[in-house]
Image (cartoon, rainbow, N blue to C red):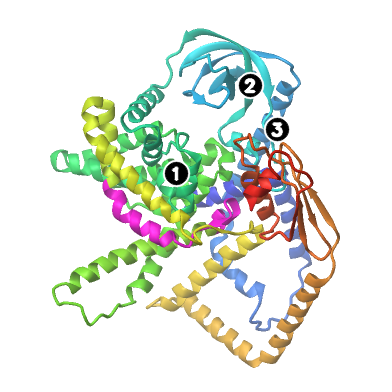
Amino acid sequence: MKRPILIILLGYIIGIIVGLYFNISIALVYLIVISILFIYKKLKIKEKRNFKLLSIKRYFRYIKIYLHSKTIILIIISSIVSNSIIIYLNQEYKNIQEKLENKQNISYKGVIVSNKEEKEYNNKYKIKIQYNKKSIKFYITTNKSIELEYGDVISFSGTYIKPEGQRNYKGYDYKKYLKQLKIYGTIKCSQIKKISKQQLNPFPKILNKIKKNVKEALGEERAGIFLGLIIGEKDDIQEEMKEKFQNASMSHILAVSGMHITYIILGINFLFKSKIGKNYTNIISIVVLVFYMVITDFSPSIIRAGIMEILMLSSKLFYKKNDTINSMAISLLIILINNPFMIENLGLQLSYSATLGMILFHKKIYQILKNIKIRNKFYLYRVKPKIDKTLDKVKEIITLSISVEISILPILLYNLNILNPYFLVSNLILSIVLVPIVIVAFTFLIFNYISFNFSKMLAEPIKLSIDVLKYISQIGVLPGSKIYFYTPSLFSIISYYLFIIITYFIYCVYSSKNPNRTQIRIKNLIALLKIYIRNNKKKLKKVIALISIVLLIYNLYPKSLKINFIDVGQGDSCLIITPMNRKILIDGGGSINSNFDVGKNTLLPYLLDKGITKLDVIIVSHFDRRPCWSVYLLL
């Protein structure tokens, strides 16, 4: 077995998905499947073998090459383990939340394990308490006048607020989000008493000092972008700026990833490799990466990149060959063992799918682009090599961007419903300016902690660098830069990835210079399929015509009337879909005095989740200070 960790990971993911979305025991499913296969094998009648071009039995043997007995046993064991864990955790969350919700007032003693988050009307902290001899975490909210610090031991009393689930169809699920953070809900404190100070992990204090110094040196707005760029801390970035970066396909630079790890390793090699040698430099790199993962609060993307890099450096220390796919599997398995609910984390999904896309598609796409030669009779003999070298770098960047976009496109459309056609332009510009910016930013960060006065010398170049990034983000306001798509179905997503996999496999078959037996068979089967299509053109045309007529009748046939009431918080909103598929929206809710944009954050996602990109009629039932505020924003 070549990659046992990958097999265990696949089984682990299957178990989590079954437990999370179906809430059933996978062991029972396996028992039923094994029973059906046993009965089928006993009742199996021998048939005369005839060649069939489209035969599941014929091509199932290729699957058997990978799904042999050891692989199946590993998948079954790991999936049963993860399935049992996710069902147990779900039940535990439910029991604790129900018990606390039934109490009018609760009192506990706990330790503050986060820095202050300033909200509009209160301060928010993360606290760890002992509940039934187990450490669990909550959010607590306090008055603005109460100041707490990381490590404070407090006794408090207050009211438990259960996290909300989905309020609308496919809407935001705050309860699921808190499970990803291992948080059981929020406690609104009425009384708080400081007891003592407990010595906890010193790294949050270091991070707090860094953030304070950065804000003082760069100002609030620039500091928010800087902290997002270097440590992935996005809480201080203005919502408007976040949206600009998202629309310009630049959000990835605000999430710590492999790019940051690469620059850290390059910097350490530059400083130490020539002085202390390769092995000691690799050891220092591993220590620095662990420290970096700690201060970035173990975000999924940094764990993925960090563990992969640590495994690669360790393989060099022990003179072993590094397997990138295996490294990815190990890092993801560690994350999911620690918290199986992280499988729903968007950052984790984007990070791993983007990396997998680069591994699978980068070389093939680059080969295609490299074969495209740009001829220009005005080339000078001495200039041509430099131009060709520059073009190769541009092709490399375009290849990486396309590889990543291919793999993450369904995830982006499912979660954000936005596509930016200028992503190649923004990534090309970023590839040029981002390297010096990140290097200078890391230097500033180090000196900012060691000597604040000395770091002020680098403040001006950092301010200029951040202003450059803000200027590039203006790509997001260009015409056509924000194309909305309705939320794709699960079937569409699976079909997309199957199409990509099949296309990639066929390309590998035809581009192989020395095809093996399996590839030769695939070529022959494709040739047979072409002959079959050529010989049965008339039949196929009739089938296609029949399917088209059936679909047309289905779409034109009147359907039942649907009335959807939308939870928009303040106010009312109703979506009516008529039998002739006309969409009518009545009101939109919201308030002119509220900072929450109902039209943008509730109505628009709801409509896109329903597959609606166009409304036929909007009805405003009454006028207040301003008519249908959220509908106005929606339009």
Q: Magenta span covers which residues?
A: 410-436
The kind of residue tagged 1 is Ser
Neighbour tally class for label 3: few under 14, some 14-19, many 20 plus, Cα within 10 Å: few
Observer able to see residue 4: no
Mark 3 / mark 2, whichever is N-terminal: 3
Q: Secondary structure at mark 1?
A: helix
Which percent across, then down, holds residue 631? 68, 48
Q: Locate residue 164 relative to residue 474 in the image: left or right.
A: right
Q: Nearer the viewer, mark 3 or mark 1?
A: 1
Observer able to see residue 333: yes
Q: Secondary structure at mark 3?
A: helix
Are the residues tagged 3 and 2 within 8 Å (C-beta)? no
Q: Which residue is mark 2?
A: 187
Establish if 280 lies above or below 579. Answer: above
Q: Which residue is mark 3?
A: 91
Q: Nearer the viewer, mark 1 or mark 2?
A: 2
Q: Residue at x 45, y 44 (%)?
A: 301
Which percent across, then down, holds residue 3? 46, 53
Quadrant in the rendering for residue 438: top left
Q: Locate residue 208 relative to residue 52 in the image: left or right.
A: left
Magenta stretch: includes residue 421: yes
Mark 3 / mark 1, whichever is N-terminal: 3
Q: Which residue is mark 1?
A: 301
